[in-house]
Amino acid sequence: MNQNFQVALVADLLGPDGQVVFQDFGVDLLADVGIPYRYLEEDLRPVIPDQIRDYDVVISMGQPYVPTSFEGVKRLSLIARTGVGYDMVDLDAATEAEVMVTITPEATKKPVASATLALMLGLCHRIRIKDAIVRENNWSSRFNHMGCEIRDRVIGLIGLGQIGQEVVALLKAFEPAEILASDPVVTGEEAAKIGVRLVDKDTLLRQSDFVSIHCPLNTHTHKLMSEQEFRIMKSSAFLINTARGPIVDQTALTKALLEGWIQGAAIDVFEQEPIDPSDPLLSLENIILAPHASAWTYELFRDIGHDCIKATMAVARGEVPPYVVNKAVLERPGLKNKLRRYKEIWENQ
């Protein structure tokens, strides 16, 4: 048993009753090899040093880690993030503290891609409006809300990483006219191999009937979709965002929907979460809203949990886990010493 290796899981993996929300998260794999773990008592935002200083690994969800989170933290080696976003972690501060940050793209791509298609189809078939027609016994109005199909439409993807590529694979069954993508780190040849035409962002916005966002949030993508971008889009186009809220200027989106610059939107993420109850988006008919949870499935949390646990066990063996996002930390002498010590303990237990 490796009692010298301590793992913490964040408090919001527990429900209000203190019981585990995600039953098949994979923590039994830690127990199988004798690695102790516990759940943090509080969900503090940002995380403070006293919460994490006594652990080798923290398995974390959406908690912010700012420079002060790492003050005096010497033992920690890994923050294993559930999901693919890492904008809530100050990577420079984590690297300075000699802490790796990992994500779980393999586990995330299918659920997010299928959620994207669900939202896209919901917009196509006016699901929100037609649900209201039935509930309000207003059947005669159903002729006023004809939908459309993905078939014969142009789909534009902002971001062609693992999730974007999975969206492409799912879209093909719906026979779109063309799939466009804008991504600065993908080549035209790479896009063409999966049947996508790589274009600049403005071309994508002008030509697409559906624009779906699949890029990370960073200094380059913050408010990537502003008033200027919405004015470029077709008046018949739809926007789907399952990535990060601040990629879209929410005020500009509201104006675009109210004034008819675009036809509609489906949004799973917001600039402020939870969204303000007085936000005008909540009163609009031409938008589908979800609470940053449209991709949440039993399978998603099973797989991201297991991938976080696998990353944890790799570190316990003194190995570098997959999908480290702050790669500069791998050259830090302090981290190398931590991994060396873990390996010695693992081999001698």
Image (cartoon, grey):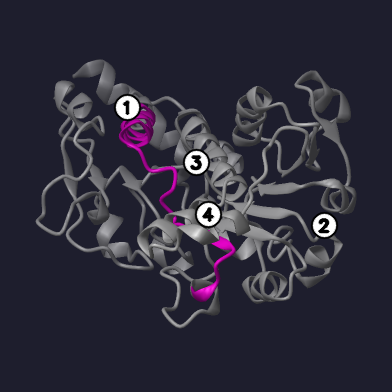
Q: Nearer the viewer, residue 170 or 175?
A: 175
Contact between labelled residues 2 and 3, with CB atoms less than 8 Å apart: no
Q: Position of residue 112 (x, y in %)?
A: 51, 39
Residue behind mark 4: 96
Q: CA distance from mark 3 to mark 1?
A: 30 Å
Q: Earlier in the sequence, mark 1 or mark 2?
A: 2
Q: Secondary structure at mark 2?
A: loop
Residue behind mark 3: 115
| Residue lying at 56% horizontally and 38% vertically, measured from the top left | 117
Residue behind mark 1: 313
Q: Earlier in the sequence, mark 3 or mark 2?
A: 3
Q: Quadrant of the N terminus?
A: top left
Residue behind mark 2: 234
Q: Earlier in the sequence, mark 4 or mark 2?
A: 4
Q: Quadrant of the C terminus?
A: top left
Residue type for callout 4: Glu
Q: Position of residue 134 (x, y in %)?
A: 40, 56
Q: Nearer the viewer, residue 159 or 52?
A: 159
Q: Earlier in the sequence, mark 4 or mark 1?
A: 4
Residue type for callout 2: Lys
